[in-house]
Image (tube, rainbow, N blue to C red):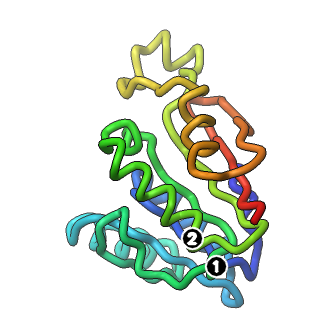
Amino acid sequence: MTAVRMGERVLQIGINDLALAAVVAARTGLSGHAVIVVPDDARAERARRACAENGTLADVIVTPLDQLPLATADIDVVIVHSVDNLLGELDATTLAALMRECRRVLRVGGRLIVIEAGARSRLATLLGKGAVAARSAEVSVQTLEAAGFRTARIIADREGLRFTEGLKAE
């Protein structure tokens, strides 16, 4: 659902699913560049291990999520992993700063994709799985629009994951 292509420069923030992060990083290929930003050393080590196990090259950076150490307009796609409700747990000031930083590092025409808990599948509901409560879909779109992203929309909501996308128009 992220539509990451070979040769693109991709930034991933707040990793939940290490296998997914490694697969996304692998999609950039040798001609692209994958960066994973995490807030602490323990997550950085897990991300490095997941990339190594998947044969993926990625720079893993430990930094506060609202202070991205990347050049302006240097990234094609930013993916914010919020399946564990990362965005919902940030205070309003930090969330606004994170969104501003994501917009800053994206090139014009670049995309921000938020992956978060969505509608649970019927099977998950029957099995009682999917403990993380989903934020409202409207909140996700409003968060991106408030940060200046255009055409913010839900691109998919299935199997317990929701993908919300916004474009940097200018």
The residue beneath circle 1 is: 73
Q: Residue placed farthest to the bottom in the image?
A: 31
Say what secondary structure mark 1 lies in. loop
Mark 2 vs 1: CB contact within 8 A: yes
Tell me where residue 97 appears, x and y as whole percent: 41, 58
Tell me where residue 111 appears, x and y as whole percent: 70, 60
Question: Residue placed at 45% from the left, 61% from the top?
Answer: 13
Say what secondary structure mark 2 lies in. helix
Tell me where residue 120 appears, x and y as whole percent: 54, 21
Q: Quadrant of the C terminus?
A: bottom right
- Which quadrant of the figure has residue 41? bottom left
91 left or right of 28 in image: left
Tell me where residue 127 appears, x and y as whole percent: 44, 15
User: In the picture shown, does residue 94 fall above or below 45?
Assistant: above
Classed neighbour count for the residue bearing mark 1: other residues with Cα under 10 Å, few (<14), some (14–19), many (≥20): some
> Which amino acid lies under the numbered mark 2 shown in the image of this protein?
Arg
90 left or right of 100 in image: left
> Which amino acid lies under the numbered mark 1 shown in the image of this protein?
Ala
Front residue of this view, candidates 108 and 41? 108
The residue beneath circle 2 is: 104
Total marks placed: 2
